[in-house]
Amino acid sequence: MTLSGKLIENSVMIHENGVEELHRTSFYGRPRDNALELSLPESAFLIYVDKIKVELDGIELDFRQFFMKASSLVKNFELFYIVYKDLRERGYFIQPAAMGFRVYPRGGHPGKTPAQFFVFVTSERMPLALSDLKKHIDTVDNLKKRLVLAIVDEESDITFYEAKRTYPSGTCKIDLNISLSTTSFLEDRCMIWDSSTSNELHNGRFFGKPMDEGLLQLSLVESSYLMNKGIIEIENRHNEKLDFTKFSGIASRIESDFMTKYKVYEALRNRGLIPKTGFKFGTHFRVYRSFEKVSDIKHSDFLVHAIEHDHIFSLLQLSRAVRLANSVRKEMIYASAGSEVDFFVIGRMRL
Amino acid sequence: MTLSGKLIENSVMIHENGVEELHRTSFYGRPRDNALELSLPESAFLIYVDKIKVELDGIELDFRQFFMKASSLVKNFELFYIVYKDLRERGYFIQPAAMGFRVYPRGGHPGKTPAQFFVFVTSERMPLALSDLKKHIDTVDNLKKRLVLAIVDEESDITFYEAKRTYPSGTCKIDLNISLSTTSFLEDRCMIWDSSTSNELHNGRFFGKPMDEGLLQLSLVESSYLMNKGIIEIENRHNEKLDFTKFSGIASRIESDFMTKYKVYEALRNRGLIPKTGFKFGTHFRVYRSFEKVSDIKHSDFLVHAIEHDHIFSLLQLSRAVRLANSVRKEMIYASAGSEVDFFVIGRMRL
């Protein structure tokens, strides 16, 4: 039986019998006094499957007319429709939510179980501010749900990502008991010339990269960290000692995001983790949780990319980073460097 | 026997007997009248392996002193040394070149064979302008050599990439004989409502993505291309016809790099290729060379990212893109949209 409804503002209102027909067992819409209220994506879907007809000002709208109308009423209606239809056709029960949909777990439905996911719907073309993502994550976390990003690409395919906070930690302590060593700051890296310090730092805590026998090259972030820990002093080519302010000033001219990277590096090391460059994976760091001997180190545990607290994600870049991390079976973690460093893990999921 | 040399400007000059000792069979340096001239990376390496001693103003420099001096004389000396040492220790014969090194093929050496590779040495931190890369590619191409980028990461590891021009082509012709169809421009994609046109475009030439039965969603670049080919007309929600100028103006507000993407899309289609969104791979397009039936289409052949002619590569991004492409066994191609569209393939290589 095809039910009749009216398009009123941004909803379709169906007569009371819709509650029994559409809501009681199929969980479309929300019962209101003597009526069933349907959202526009729900309505378009129900028109498509011939369950309802919708009138506007006494005239019935066909699918195309309804779709065009809805698209002019609700921003991103097409995206909502694509995601709604996909989830519904795959057996999920769904209710509208501010930023997308609440989705019930398989086997669950409104009235029986709480929703499990909040699905935030967006398009590959829309930039996503970290501040917005954080807000979504924290809202959803407070409700004890899981946040899903449904990203609709140019071809109307959907990729689902789960985003959540994470609190990585490791077991590597910086309790080195070695005498202060002098390090030379060359073009864009530092060199330790003393072979016993080189050995302690590399074999003991996996700092730097041994070059020739007894020499250790340190990256800019490693050098800063060890200087701040009082383990090395840094001199320039004219044998002038550099303090952190001077060194980080020069380092920031070499790589403009040095301070962001440094804050994240420091936070990771302070958490007992071992960050090394992630260049081969296109991220700032690959990170190891534990460490016995350099020769035993195999695969890193996850990848970390340092971003500023006001970072705006390009979803194309996000897709690339997550896909690459997953292809090497690692988690992709974004670390935002504000007054504190927060960690967010973003991974593809099958919903 | 340890030979003695003098640091003079940016070279080390070794007495004539060096020609026999170092050049004749090991191909270090370049013979000059009565002497052998060594570059600074060669010299540092030869000091390290105890083959030479070097004096400056009558005083012998040890490895550390020589290294610091060389690093102050030559920009990026550390990088050159790292790459020189790596290649030399792996058995390659090498001569200096303007932007890095000329490298001889395995089994070959100066005087016997021409150099095979030009190795351009850089650091992960240095941005690389497309215009410079193009210049290197064309110079090396004229000499019938191969261009290698040796990128030294923060940890002094080297990743080698080969970069060259490529001329992709496919077999899909746009010879559709269908009547002009009207398309609705919605929020950020277009919709074809006519089912026979939808079917022709999708099943015949792999345009768009079928939504519900008989409807086809087209991306912004697909819509523009079909409009320019006279296959569709585009109307906005108020049934006003849009020409290319208007449509591309709106599209450019939706995605700022629309025109760059469009130029590349058009060039690919005109070459008989089928570009579809590469979102899942973090690039603009995945591209198919040939096409029989939509249902038979399996894996795309390569990935294409559209860039402007004045693009500056971040090497971290380049590393991520190439690694991801390789992990799915596809070539990574950058397409620069200037007055013409040029294609460059960049892939990791083992040197």
Image (tube, coloured by chain):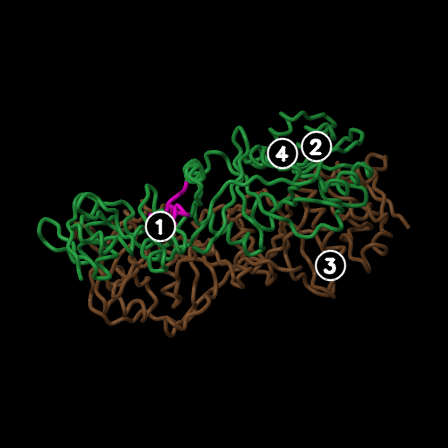
Chain colours: A green, B brown
Crowd tier of the residue under label 2, counting other residues whose Cα lies within 10 Å: few below 14, some 14–19, many 20 or above: some
Task: Look at the image and tell me whether residue B340 can be seen.
Answer: yes
Distance CA(mark 3)–CA(mark 2): 36 Å
User: What residue sits right under mark 4 in the picture?
Assistant: A266
Q: Are marks 3 and 2 on the same chain?
A: no
Name the subunit of mark 3: B
Q: Secondary structure at mark 3?
A: loop
Q: Is residue A185 left or right of residue B214?
A: right
- Closer to the eye: label 3 or 2: 2
Label 1 resides on the chain identified as B
As drawn, the label of residue B258 is 1
Circle nearer the viewer, 3 or 4: 4
- Circles 1 and 2: CB distance less than 8 Å? no
Tag 2 subunit: A
Task: Kindly state the secondary structure of the residue where label 1 is placed.
Answer: helix
Q: Few, some or many C-alpha atoms within 10 Å of disc 4 (few <14, some 14-19, many ≥20)?
A: many
Q: Residues within 10 Å of mark 3 (few under 14, many from 20)?
A: some
- Judged left or right of residue B120, residue B73 is right
| Closer to the camera in the image, B212 or A257 | B212
Q: Label 3, on which residue?
A: B92
